[in-house]
Image: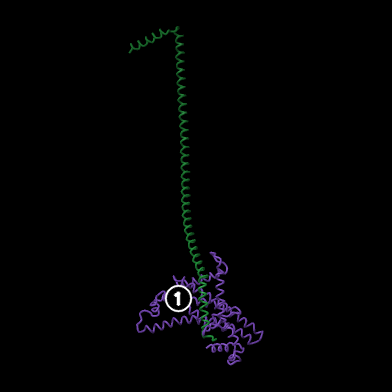
Amino acid sequence: MERIFTRGLMSFLLSVDEHGRGTEHGSGGIKEYVMHHVKDQVIYPLHIGNFDISITKHVLMLWIAAAILIIFIPLAFRSKTLIPKGPANLIEAIVVYLKETIIDPYLGSEAFKYAPYLLTAFFFIITCNLLGLIPMGATATGNISVTISLALSTLFLVQFSNILKNGFKGYIKSFVPSGIPSVMVPLIFAVEFLGMLTKHVALAIRLFANMFAGHLVIFTIMGLIFLFKNIFIAPFPILGIVFVSLLELLIALIQAYIFTILSAVFIGMGLSSHH
Amino acid sequence: MDLLSPNAGTIFWTVVTFVLLLLILKKFAWGPILKGLEDRENRIKSAVYQAEHDQKEAEKHLEEQKRIIGEANKESVKLLNDSKETAEHTRKEIVEQARSEAERMLERAKQEIDLSKEAAIADVKKYAVDISLLAAQKVVGETLSEKQQINLIEKYINELSQTT
């Protein structure tokens, strides 16, 4: 699927011959160049038994993002003033915005329990997204494994919060609307359960596709420079890259916000699941 | 590494990183920040409440002050009117007194004049009697002694009683 996807994009954007030189065997070429930049690479191979837990480029970016958050947020808030200044003010403004537009409206009285998760998700995702826009950086959120992990976290949180709030019986019941014939119960249960899973899969795919596609476009346009090998052509791809990068900046924000708001919505739905 | 197939190692690291980040940030970032927000909200709330309360208090005081000033104003106007009235009254009284005094004095003067006039008239009359007596004596040629005068008077009285 990946091959069809990339090849289609390549032939559309670059008019590269589908059987062009090097596309299959990785000896140079535009596709190789683009893929090199958007795909994950092992930096430090690591295995525990048969389990491959190699440190990859994206894992490293995750750690850099986490380190930035862990160092800079407490650092910004180290002076305990009533009205924060500078970076603390920026972070606080974002926190207040998220609290007032997402956390409080969807979670109500239980907002304080889930606020740390949603805030962490937002700041982690946006930091990863923005790190991808920095030269030499890589977009960890453009990796399906990363977004699946984030969506899984939300999935587990939603299930656990539902079970804790409504009990296991209530949790099972939340998949079966009341007032349906008993014959239909297994079918409805399966449909509702799949529907729930689909929402979370969509959460993973949405973030991944948005971040991945943006970078694919940026590197593809950049590839034009190497394709034409002409200095007078170069300004146009560069203008294109600037434009797409600005768009990416917007998408980085929007996707982090969407992930957070959907997580809050799913948690809120789970908490009040009385059909 | 395929683009769309999840990699177990990356998933493992992401979950570990995310969970650790969540725990650390919850303790060192979100906890204090959210608490700070709540504290500030409470402080602002109480400050606003206090301000409202103070304003009400101030308005009440202002109203009270206005009332007191109004009363004082009324009081002073009343006092002024009273004193004016008193002054007028006193003035009239004094004028009246003065007038009556003057009238009384005038009256007394008149009486004195009358008295003096009467006295003068009496004097004149007595003087006239004396003169006439003197003239009569001259005419009679001798001065009647006191005894003769009394006799004469008794004689006249007797005559008078005889005629009646």
Q: Is residue B56 above or below residue B79?
A: below
Report the front residue among A86 and B164: A86
From the image, state the color of chain B.
green
Report the front residue among B140 and B79: B79
Q: Residues within 10 Å of mark 1 (few under 14, many from 20)?
A: many
Of all residues, the one furthest to the front in this rendering is A49
Q: If the image is split into quadrants, where does the N terminus of chain B sit?
A: bottom right
Image quarter of residue B118 = top left
Query: Which residue is pictured at 60% across the width and 78% down the height?
Result: A134
- Image side of residue B148 versus residue A229, left or right: left
Q: If the image is split into quadrants, where does the C terminus of chain B sit?
A: top left
For the colour purple, the matching chain is A
- Image side of residue A153 versus residue A167, left or right: right
Count of numbered circles on the image:
1
Residue A52 location in percent, x, y?
A: 53, 84
Residue B73 location in percent, x, y?
A: 48, 48
Label 1 is found on which chain of the structure? A
Of all residues, the one furthest to the top in this rendering is B142
- Image side of residue B157 versus residue A82, left or right: left
Report the front residue among B164 and A222: A222
Q: Is residue A114 above or below residue B96?
A: below
Query: Which residue is pictured at 46% across the width and 40% down the height?
Result: B86
Residue B104: tell me if it is visible: yes
Q: Which residue is mark 1?
A: A267
Residue A144: tell me if it is visible: no
Residue B67 location in percent, x, y?
A: 46, 51
Residue A136 location in percent, x, y?
A: 61, 80
Q: Of the residues shown, which amino acid type is indicated by label 1?
A: Ile
